[in-house]
Amino acid sequence: MNKEIRQLAGLVQEADKVAFFGGAGVSTESGIPDFRSAQGLFHQQRAIPPETILSRSFFLSQPEMFFDYYKENLVAPQARPNPAHQALAALEKAGKLVGVVTQNIDGLHQAAGSKNVLELHGSVHRNFCMRCNKAHALAHVMESPGLPMCGCGGLVRPDVVLYEEGLDDRVTREAARLIAGSDLLIVGGTSLNVYPAAGYVRLCPGKLVIINRDPTPMDRQADLLIRSPIGQTFAQLMALLGTDGAGPA
């Protein structure tokens, strides 16, 4: 067990309210690609950039191309929670973690058992008709041979935030309150280059831990910086704290 993991365990044990803010890197160990790393989706060589395909205007003008890309690259129904998701759920159950703020849309935090999850960019598991607002399951989107349509004739779209769209005000307010009320913020798997979401990190009045493979703009402000894979880091943390997250094993 290295020194950094022991430092992290000490910070978690000392804290009364731990919050977690995570990005795409949290799910890479579950087999879901991230966006901005060298192997990420945004570095794919495509005739149309992913940022364009995932924009509201492109979705409205070219829905067939949007759904082809979306279903192939942003939805991973076979993915399962990794040790990071599982550890965060255990810490919440133990009363240490007050909640998760995530930029991910994969639903893996909830699949691992987390209850208080604030999804800044929505979820692939929520879908609705643009005409009548009827809810539809992910299976309806994935199994539709063409465009996913509602019985009323309206187009079904995923409840995810596209480029050119704003974040949900209620979710952003709750995320800000959650982080501002914590005394330890653990940031994991995010470049902290996307705003306004990345600005939440500055709201925590307590200690800051950053677990990320690549450098971030907030590294110098961190009380602890860990460069190891986040799933591996949390697996080692829980081995030290005990499976219930309450204290030493």
Image: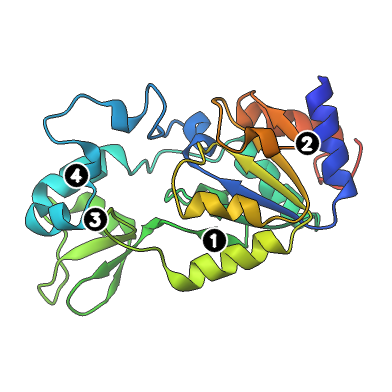
Which callout, 1 or 2, points to the residue nearer the camera?
Answer: 1
Residue type at numbered disc 3: Val
Single out the mark in the foreground, 2 or 3: 2
User: Which numbered tag is attached to residue 118?
Assistant: 1
* Above or below, comparing residue 5 to residue 79 in the picture: above
The numbered mark at residue 238 is: 2
**Closer to the observer: label 3 or label 1?**
1
Three-letter code for the amino acid on which mark 1 is drawn? Leu
Please rate how many residues cluster around mark 3, counting C-alpha atoms within 10 Å: few if below 14, some from 14 to 19, many from 20.
many
Instruction: Give, as a three-letter code, the residue at label 2.
Output: Met
Q: Quadrant of residue 32?
A: top left
Labels 1 and 2: the sequence-earlier one: 1
Q: Residue 150 shows which numbered tag?
A: none
Q: In this view, does 85 lie above or below 25?
A: below
First of labels 2, 3 by sequence position: 3
Residue labelled with disc 3:
141
Decide: few, some or many residues near mark 1? Use Cα within 10 Å; few <14, some 14-19, many ≥20. Answer: many
Colour approach in the figure? rainbow
Q: What element carries label 4?
A: helix
